[in-house]
């Protein structure tokens, strides 16, 4: 029933271009390890996440599979699976592991929301105690990471989550695998998802170690242009009065965006990075004071994803500059209580000027 509910169109969201771009890039390339959206409430953060999922193409997966595995993902996971509904369960005919015999179905991309009070067992998965008591068999009960596979995991107020839960989320987002180890049972399953975290900095910051684990970070605020604020009110009022009619008006733009994302996903593996631009990335990270090498690697991936988004197979310097604004603000060294940088290019120029003055 929720899948049929009309969602505010992604293309109808006024402004917030950096947030929309960061979300789109993570859909094109999930290996970017998610995006952290920092900003005040009422700035379309959750609206954008749900709206983007609504226009994405449906995914094909094994019918009744609790992990929504693609036909190409069968194998060790299916052989170890003990889910009653799963066609690859050991209890079933092992021939069902043959890809040609497994039935598939298509479903919409899911947005799995993680409650602030979620426990690690709820996130990762745990033992199905009811099944164990009734049948005397050990069986894994999948968690939210299993439900989020090939979808979007949305964590509102991520800064209020327990640190160890955030660690688990970021590990899975980076590795694409979740491992459940409970009561002598070890079970791994794919957990490739787009991680979207939102937070209001006024309610507390994430530790720098956790900030660094998010691939991209954007700072957003309320729109200051009067005309655009009026557009926000008009569009929202129209949507509330007639959701279906409003969605139809934006159907063409939504379809064009969906097709562009699909083309970029297909093009990304062919994108190349000229070696001289790798030196530009390294210099940029050194100039702004980034610790470690994760920033360099994420900038590389982001620049290639931006090139694919623009329909190109070669990265340009402009892609590096745009990638820096998304991948580095939350990674630069800060003094205690200092906020995350908003303009990474201004930070670079300031640091260069100070270095030249000392020299």
Image (cartoon, grey):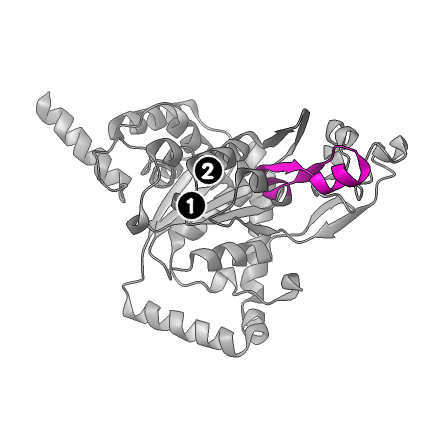
Q: Element at badge 1?
A: helix
On the question of residue 62 being in view, the answer is yes
Residue drawn at x 42%, y 23% is: 275
Is 309 situated above or below 279?
Answer: below
Q: How many marks?
A: 2
* The magenta segment: 124-146
Residue drawn at x 65%, y 65% is: 4
Q: Are marks 2 and 1 in contact (CB under 8 Å)?
A: yes
Judged left or right of residue 71, residue 44 is: left
Residue drawn at x 58%, y 71% is: 248
Residue 166 is marked as: 2
Judged left or right of residue 216, residue 184 is: right
Residue 80 is marked as: none
**Quarter of the image where one finds residue 230:** bottom left
Q: Which residue is mark 1?
A: 158
Q: Residue furthest front?
A: 133
Q: Earlier in the sequence, mark 2 or mark 1?
A: 1
Assess disc 2: are there few (<14), some (14-19) or many (≥20) residues with their C-alpha within 10 Å of its C-alpha: many
Residue sitting nearer the eye, 316 or 327 = 327
């Amino acid at each position: 029933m929720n899948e049929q509910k009309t969602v505010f169109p992604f293309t109808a969201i006024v402004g917030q271009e950096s947030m929309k771009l960061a979300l789109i890039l993570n859909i094109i390339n999930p290996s970017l390890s998610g995006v952290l959206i920092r900003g005040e409430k009422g700035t379309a953060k959750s609206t954008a996440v749900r709206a983007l999922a609504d226009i994405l193409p449906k995914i094909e997966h094994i019918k009744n599979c609790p992990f929504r595995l693609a036909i190409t993902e069968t194998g060790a996971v299916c052989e170890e699976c003990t889910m009653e509904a799963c066609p690859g369960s050991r209890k079933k005919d092992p021939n069902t592991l043959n890809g040609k015999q497994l039935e598939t179905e298509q479903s919409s991309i899911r947005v799995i929301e993680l409650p602030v009070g979620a426990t690690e067992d709820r996130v990762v998965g745990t033992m199905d105690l009811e099944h164990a008591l009734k049948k005397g068999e050990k069986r894994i009960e999948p968690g939210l990471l299993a439900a989020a596979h090939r979808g979007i995991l949305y964590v509102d107020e991520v800064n209020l989550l327990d640190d160890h839960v955030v660690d688990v989320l970021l590990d899975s987002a980076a590795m694409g695998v979740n491992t459940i180890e409970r009561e002598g049972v070890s079970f791994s399953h794919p957990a490739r998802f787009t991680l979207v975290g939102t937070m209001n900095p006024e309610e507390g910051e994430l530790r720098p170690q956790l900030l660094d684990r998010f691939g991209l970070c954007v700072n957003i605020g309320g729109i200051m242009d009067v005309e655009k604020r009026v557009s926000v009110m008009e569009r929202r009022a129209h949507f509330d009065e007639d959701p279906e009619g409003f969605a139809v008006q934006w159907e063409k733009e939504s379809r064009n965006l969906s097709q562009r994302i699909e083309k970029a996903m297909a093009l990304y593996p062919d994108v190349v990075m000229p070696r001289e631009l790798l030196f530009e990335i390294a210099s940029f990270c050194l100039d702004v004071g980034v610790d470690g090498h994760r920033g360099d690697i994420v900038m590389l991936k982001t620049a290639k994803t931006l090139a694919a988004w623009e329909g190109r197979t070669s990265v340009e310097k402009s892609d590096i500059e745009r990638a820096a604004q998304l991948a580095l603000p939350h990674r630069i060294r800060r003094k205690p209580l200092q906020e995350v940088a908003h303009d990474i290019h201004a930070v670079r120029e300031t640091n260069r000027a100070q270095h030249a003055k000392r020299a």
